[in-house]
Amino acid sequence: MDRFRYQSFAQEVIFALGALAQLSEVVGRLGWRKILLCTSRSIHANGQVDALETILGGSLVVVFDQVQPHVQDFQVKEALTLTAENKAEAVIGMGGGSSIGMAKAIGFQAHLPIIAIPTTYAGSEMTPVYGITHTDENPPRKVTVNDPKIVPTLVIYDPRLTLDLPPKLTASTGINALAHCIEALYSKTRNPLSTTAAVEGVRHIHHALLRCYQDGHDLDARTEMLLGAHLAGLSLASVSMGLHHGLCHVLGGSAKIPHGIANSIILPHAIRFNAEATASQLLPAAEAMNILENGTNSKAVIEALARRIHELIGQMNLPQRLRDAGVDESDLPRLAQIAFQNRTVQNNPQSITDVMELEHLLRSAW
Ligand code: NAD
């Protein structure tokens, strides 16, 4: 890597067991008196909203706890109205990537600071991007918005908040984090920071994810996995993504597949598709997963990496085929067409010149 260019972002990041309790101190220091919370029903149901209400007291003025997956445009409108009515001065997203994405959309559109409190491993808290689903199109289409002002000002990582994350979501959002690292490693805009974060992210995720899946209350594993997810998000923040993320957005927006599940199905296929062009960048990931053996050629190592990831996904009982996620075989040509127009897909390190290449990939994933 002898030339690079990237933008870094000013964020305050607090990572600690019990870090949630530090929120009131930071909110007081930054002078936010009226805060809107975006979250989802399951986070409310497991008591985390009550905990936040206790910590923030009167400064938490509105709770929007109906966040649906993939940031629906009509929900953003509703929450923006609440923001204006209550004169909110900051917005919190607590939950998975969808709650944080909603908070980003509101903060960006209403010019408010954004606080992210992740409870999954999706990594959105570190990035200057959100996706929003336009529901007036048929099929609905997910569009990404990219701007440095979207980066959350404050990120609170508290591993305790992940203890209730069910095994399937642990597994699928953990694979999403692994995918950030993989695509950051071979990104066209990779840089020394993204590469270092991605390799360390792979190491921690590989060491911790299966343990979190097997025992959700293993606090050491949860802490290491959240660190891996943070590094994965950090690696993602300064690079552009390729085929894998582009396809997952298409499958989320147009086939309604949950983001983590789409990641689990697509990742091994994307690695194989890109093997030729990206082998040398992916070797450190293989090394971090203890796959590298002396004397093995790089193509064989990348195939072993794809197999190992596929195996890990199988060990966590995640769907591994599009047919198991509700996609009809007859949908594949239409999905390939949508993906072929997708900017992120077209930003792949190995160029994609024929829509049939995508249809072929989707068929092997079906
Ligand atoms: P999600 O936010 O849609 O959440 C999935 C489910 O998990 C929800 O029902 C939620 O209530 C539940 N949940 C979350 N945390 C929980 C916990 N601790 N305990 C119990 N239940 C919990 O899923 P996700 O995979 O975290 O995020 C996916 C979304 O984030 C997608 O829209 C994706 O495009 C976006 N994303 C964006 C970026 C970015 O950089 N902008 C990065 C990754 C993902």
Image: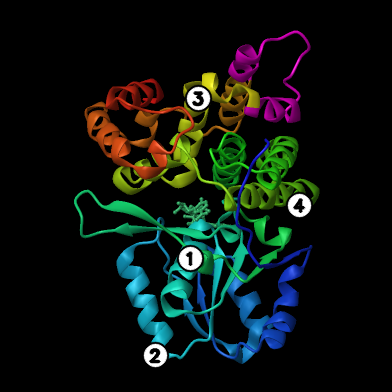
Tell me the distance, in whole angstroms, between the alpha carbons under discs 3 and 2.
Answer: 49 Å
| Residue at disc 3, secondary structure | loop
Q: Earlier in the sequence, mark 4 or mark 2?
A: 2
**Where is residue 278 drawn, in percent x and y?**
57, 25
Crowdedness near tag 4: few (<14), some (14–19) or many (≥20) residues, C-alpha within 10 Å: many
- Give the CA separation, mark 4 to mark 2: 38 Å
Camera-side mark, 4 or 1: 4
Horizontal placement of 22 versus 10: left or right? Answer: right
Residue under circle 1? Answer: 40
Coloring applied to the structure:
rainbow
Which numbered dot is residue 223? 4
Magenta span: chief secondary structure: helix
Determine contact: label 2, label 1, CB under 8 Å.
no
What is the spatial separation of the Cα atoms under label 4 and label 3, in whole angstroms?
Answer: 32 Å
Residue 31 tag number:
none
- Residue at screen point 48% across, 74% down: 107
Say whether disc 1 or disc 3 marks the residue closer to the N-terminus: 1
Single out the residue that lies furthest toward the top: 295
For mark 2, what is the residue?
85
Could you say where residue 226 lies in the image, as x and y percent from the top left? 70, 52
Tell me if mark 1 has few (under 14), some (14-19) or many (20+) residues whose alpha carbon lies within 10 angstroms of its own: many
- Is residue 187 left or right of 253 when viewed as pictured? right
Three-letter residue code for mark 1:
Ser
Q: Amino acid at mark 2?
A: Glu
Where, quadrant-wise, is the N terminus in this rendering?
top right
Considering every residue shown, the one lying at the far front of the view is 3
Which-is-in-front pick, marks 4 and 2?
2
Question: Marks 1 and 4: in contact by CB < 8 Å?
Answer: no
CA gap between label 1 and label 3 equals 36 Å
Judged by depth in the image, the label closer to the viewer, 1 or 3, is 3
